Amino acid sequence: MQRSNLFAHIELSKFVAGLKLDPEECRSSLISQHAYFLLIPSRMFSDQLVPEWEDICATVFRSGPARDEEGRIVANAVRNTIRQMSREECIEIVKRVMSLQQKVAAEF
């Protein structure tokens, strides 16, 4: 069985370390750590974990970038989507990322 790349393990561990499950801080922790969704490519995960990471990423990219009146991008797709998510959705994303990190860690 092919395991996830060490890069995914290290970066996902750092990502999870910065996340919070507290409903008051969940969204802000996701926004402050949002670059990890762009930094960790799905090819770094084992074949069985790729779909899970891709599904998480699809969820946080769903709204697309925010644009101003002139059409300029003012927030990337991940930041914009997280801003629009409910607290419950943010908590669910954090739980899914934490669960994925545990699965990746178990491969090592």
Image (cartoon, helix red, strand yellow):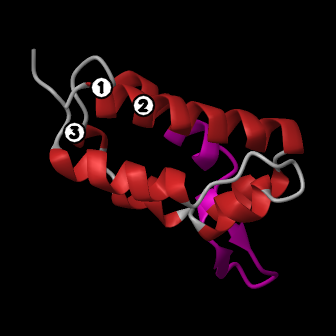
Question: Which residue in the protein does label 2 denote?
Answer: 102
Question: Which residue in the protein does label 1 denote?
Answer: 106
> Which quadrant, please, contains the C terminus?
top left
Which element type, helix, strand or loop, lies under badge 3?
helix
Front residue of 63 and 12: 12
**Residue type beneath disc 1:** Ala
> Residue 92: x percent and y percent?
72, 33
Front residue of 106 and 95: 106
* 3D distance between C-alphas at marks 3 and 1: 18 Å
**Residue type beneath disc 2:** Gln
Please give the name of the residue rendered at 82% of the width and 49% of the height, measured from the top-left corner. 22
**Residue type beneath disc 3:** Arg
Question: Which residue in the protein does label 3 denote?
Answer: 43
Please give the name of the residue rendered at 62% of the width and 55% of the height, measured from the top-left corner. 19
For the residues bearing labels 1 and 2, Cβ distance under 8 angstroms: yes
Q: Earlier in the sequence, mark 3 or mark 1?
A: 3
Please give the name of the residue rendered at 59% of the width and 48% of the height, measured from the top-left corner. 61
Q: Which residues are magenta?
A: 57-78
Please give the name of the residue rendered at 32% of the width and 32% of the height, measured from the top-left corner. 104
> Residue 17: x percent and y percent?
52, 56
> Which quadrant, please, contains the N terminus?
top left
> Residue 99: x percent and y percent?
51, 29
* 3D distance between C-alphas at marks 3 and 2: 18 Å
